[in-house]
Amino acid sequence: MIKGRKVGMPYQFLEDIATADIAFEAWGNNLEKTFLAAADATMNVMIEELDSIQPIETRKIRLENEALDMLLFDFLQELIYWKDSEKLMLRIKEIGIREENKHHFLEADALGEKLDPERHHQRVDVKAVTLHRFRLEKTEEGWKASVILDI
Amino acid sequence: MAVLSSIEKISETVWELPVSYKKGMRVPARIYGTEKLLKEMDETVYDQITNVATLPGITKYALCMPDGHFGYGFPIGGVAAMDAEQGVISPGGIGFDINCGMRLVTTNLTYHEVHPYLKELVNRLYERVPAGVGSTGFLRMSRKEFREAVEQGARWCVKKGYGWEEDLELTEESGCMEGADSSKISEKAVDRGFNQIGTLGSGNHYLEIQVARRENIFDENLAKSFGITIPDQVVIMFHCGSRGFGHQVATDYLQVFLKVMESKYGIKILDRELASAPFDSPEGRDYFAAMKCAINMSFANRQVIVHRIREVFSDIFGRSPEDLEMHMVYDVAHNTAKLERHRVDGKIKNLLVHRKGATRAFGPQMEGIPKRYQPTGQPVIIGGSMETGSYLLAGTPGGDQTFFSTAHGSGRTMSRTKARKLWYGKKLQQEMEGRGIYVRTASWSGLAEEAGPAYKNIDEVVEATEQAGISKRVVRFLPVGNVKG
């Protein structure tokens, strides 16, 4: 499904899946790029123009999970956490994912600023990442994440 | 839709998928609605409700209300009663927005009296009841106080002066679910919620000024008992939940359950979003106590909002809220799991009734509803789309077929992503104003996503609930002013 996809954006919102919530697919030629794309997709559900978010404050994200897909789940959930706890809208600047003893580790720097209704045009608030049809899969080109966010 | 060939018609508004439909189903799935509503349902609804039918301890049927639509784990509109001894508790059967619900407040003002002040009212409500992404409220409290508040719910608010004593009686569970234990709550959940009491949130959450026109009163006696007494009476209805706090509680326990579900309890599920634990287990009990905190946070949230609404009306009309008779009709929860006693095949059983996008609709003379509604059955508040209208219903004795549950709204038929391509928020706002509905919103595209045609026809939905005998129409309200999250 290509419709609704903006040129150059490594994610797309799906029209035919989920009615009250929002479904997206995000992709990249490696894991890091896929995670970054999924983070931007999540933020783009809340803020219309991601470029309006200025990189003023930094939050370090450190996560560990046995399951790679649950690492993505935790990672997106972090962004939702900062949105509520400090009203911070964040984008990922640096990200590294590695595997050690069957555990996956993520380190990322998230940069952004507090929501300013004058400059940040809001769309809808994200309540949570759901696990319904949640998938992180290897593709011929790299990786693809399928996510439904609860609105 | 292939599934419709497997469905058995029980009556004009009740349809059944037998246990043979899917491997692992323990009980049949019953879907409520007219044939037309059934055909409009997303095929995923049938898949999801039959997945629910596989959960351990499910009793009698997995039920889906006429406003059912695509959810996660459970469909929205899903109801499942689990045996309290043998059954499970599942966050996916409650929703992330624990105790998302509706509250209805009356006034003794007519539309004629309110009309000249409508814009001022909506503008002031928009300022006083924050909406939108990550919105924060006016209450400043310590984290310790917040933990107290979530154990006490609306009672905490009334103690602090936000509301009237009578509001408590007119709230499900009297505004405080007993057994809420904040030691079962993560710091993260507190971080996400402790600034958010008194806020609407976003998505389909709203606060509306509505009118009860004489021609829209279905049952005059019931309407009177519920406080709708004068022609063109103005009421205020709003829809919101437990905000980031409840969302985090659900997320936390979803992960806890995923870890123990299969390894410790041998529970196998068809969708990870149905993660469950035995209700009678340490994890199940912890979640139940934590979920009750989120239920109470939501009651507190709606209680503070009522206080703000009364302040705004009182300021603008220069009369006290008491003089304006701004009484609550009721507060209903539509995302919960509650321990209830129901008769199943002649025997009274303790059941954990999950309602996800479904409203409890207790009939006359039932325990657990306010004394004043004993003769009538409880009021049921159904939020429609912002363009069409909403309903007040009453619980009926026929509700015993659905563990006394009914619809919660009109239910969506179109995805948000599609709706925002079809409508433009600003243009929609102007068009609605032309039709006499004044809207303020925190988000233009959010407004477009809520356009009326993205929803089912609410008249058909509530008519189906009445035809099935699970609730009865009392009043239909028309929107005239709206604060959109």
Image: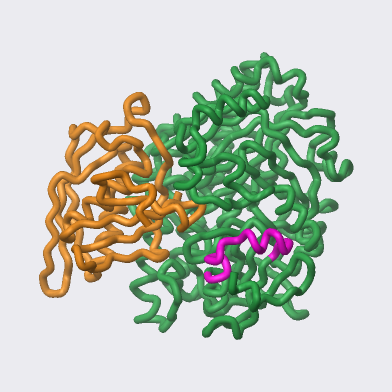
Chain colours: A orange, B green
Quarter occupied by residue B354: bottom right
**Image height check: is B210 above or below A132?**
above
* Region in magenta: B32-47
Q: Is residue B459 left or right of residue A15?
A: right
- Residue B176 visible within the image: yes
Q: Is residue B329 left or right of residue B100?
A: right
- Residue B300 visible within the image: no
In reply to whether residue B199 is colored magenta, the answer given is no
**Image height check: is B63 above or below B299?**
below
Q: Is residue B217 left or right of residue B442?
A: right
In reply to whether residue B44 is colored magenta, the answer given is yes
Foreground pick, B140 / B105:
B105
Residue at (67% x, 33% y) in the render: B479
* Magenta segment, prevailing SS (helix, strand or loop): helix
Quarter occupied by residue B330: top right
**Image height check: is B269 above or below B216?**
below
Residue at the extreme right: B221
Whole-percent x, y for residue A119 in the image = 32, 26
Residue at (76% x, 61% y) in the render: B470
Q: Quadrant of the N terminus of chain B?
A: bottom right
Whole-percent x, y for residue A137 in the image = 26, 67
